[in-house]
Image (spheres, rainbow, N blue to C red):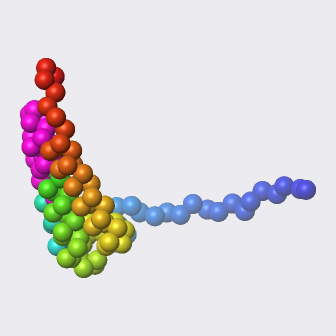
Amino acid sequence: MEQTEPDLVPPLDVPLDEPELFPIDGRRYPSTIGGIFYLVVLAITAVGIGIVWTGNWRLGTRWVAGALIFAALLRLVLPSKDAGMLAVRHRAFDCILLAGVGAALIFLATTIPNQPGL
């Protein structure tokens, strides 16, 4: 089979400095109420990780678990169009997963015995 050269296409001269071609959205805030709640859940989780970092792992784990359970409740009551980044899959799946992991963390933080000397 004979190979032929593709037709040469002249380069386009596209000015990249024209603002009409690449509009920049100045909005830097969440567009849904779920986005705001997502940031709240993220902040609570960060507080929990900070508490774990300082050495009180049980309390910090409970903070993280509380954030996950709070996220599950929010996902349950918010409509999908308003849930923002809290909506990953179907509502039931999101709620069961978030609440389940939160409950598991609370269970583990409560039932793991203290380890003397560690």
Q: Position of residue 17 (x, y in %)?
A: 34, 61
Does 85 appear above or below 116? below
Q: Position of residue 108 (x, y in %)?
A: 21, 44
Question: Is residue 23 magenta-colored?
Answer: no
Q: Position of residue 27 (x, y in %)?
A: 19, 68
Does 35 appear above or below 114? below
Q: In the image, is 1 to the left or to the right of 118?
A: right
Q: Report how many numbered discs are placed on residues in the image.
A: 0
Identity of the residue furthest to the right in this view: 1
The residue closer to the viewer here, 99 or 17, is 99
Q: In the image, is 25 to the left or to the right of 16?
A: left
Q: Is residue 43 visible?
A: no
The magenta span reads: 41-63
Residue drawn at x 82%, y 57% is 4
Q: In the image, is 59 to the left or to the right of 112?
A: left
Q: Is residue 86 visible?
A: yes
Identity of the residue furthest to the top in this view: 117
Quarter residue 16 falls in: bottom left
Quarter residue 33 falls in: bottom left
Q: Main secondary structure of the magenta part?
A: helix
The residue closer to the viewer here, 83 or 52, is 52
Residue drawn at x 19%, y 76% is 77
Q: Position of residue 107 (x, y in %)?
A: 20, 49
Question: Is residue 48 magenta-colored?
Answer: yes
Quarter containing the C terminus: top left
Does 52 appear above or below 84? above
Quarter containing the N terminus: bottom right
Q: In the image, is 61 to the left or to the right of 14?
A: left
Residue drawn at x 16%, y 34% is 113
Quarter residue 115 falls in: top left
Does 41 appear above or below 26? above
